[in-house]
Amino acid sequence: MRIYVICLATFFAIDLLWLGVIAKGFYETQLGALRKDTVSWAPAIAFYLVYLAGLVHFVVTPAAGDTRRAALNGAAFGFVTYAAFDLTSLALIEGFGWTVALVDLLWGSLLGATVAWVGAKATRAED
C-alpha cells in the first residue's frame, strides 16, 4: 500500500503540474470548445486510482526494485493506456486532432516511466 500511495502522490503532482501549468495553454488551444470550464473531479480521481492500481500491479511490483525495467515497462504501460483514450478520441470526437493525441501519448509514456521509476526506487529502499 505504501508504494501505491507514493506512486499516486507522484503521478498526481506531476500530472497536475503538466495539465495545470506547463501544457495548460497547449490543451486550451488544441481542444478549445471540447474542454469543460471546470474539471469534473470524480472521474479524474477515479482515473488516477485505477491507472495507478494497474501501474503498480503490472509494472512496479514485477520490476522488484529494478528501476530501469520499471521505467521501460512504465513507458509502455503509459503509452498503451493513453492510446486507449487518444485513439478512441480521434475516432469519435470531432475536433480532437493528431497533434494533441501525439503530445498526450508522449506525455503518458513519460509520466508512466517516471512514476514507475519512483515506485521501483521506493521498493528498493524498503529492502
Image (cartoon, grey):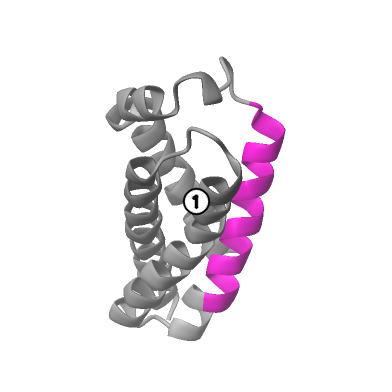
Residue drawn at x 50%, y 84% is 62
Residue 55 inside the magenta-drawn segment: yes
- Which residue is under mark 1? 86
Q: Nearer the viewer, residue 93 or 66?
A: 93
Q: Residue at x 33, y 76 (%)?
A: 72
Quarter of the picture holding the C terminus: bottom left
Q: Specify the segment rendered in magenta.
A: 40-58
* Rendering coords of residue 77 (x, y %): 47, 69
Judge left or right: residue 39 versus residue 106.
right
Residue 66, position as x, y percentages in the image: 34, 83
Which element type, helix, strand or loop, lies under badge 1? helix
Q: Is residue 46 magenta?
A: yes
Could you tell me residue 92's position as x and y percent? 61, 45
Residue 88: horizontal and vertical position, in percent? Answer: 58, 53
> Residue at 41% of width from left, 66% of height from top?
116
User: Badge 1, how many Cα within 10 Å: few under 14, some, many 20+?
Assistant: many
Q: Quadrant where the N terminus lies?
A: bottom right
Q: Nearer the viewer, residue 28 or 120?
A: 28
Front one among 95 and 43: 95
Please report the residue visible at 33 percent of the width from the left and 72 percent of the height from the top.
71
In depth, the one of 8 and 37 nearer the eye is: 37
Quarter-wise, where is residue 18 in the image? top left
* Looking at the image, residue 13 lies above or below residue 38: below
Majority SS type along the magenta span: helix
Q: Amino acid at mark 1?
A: Asp
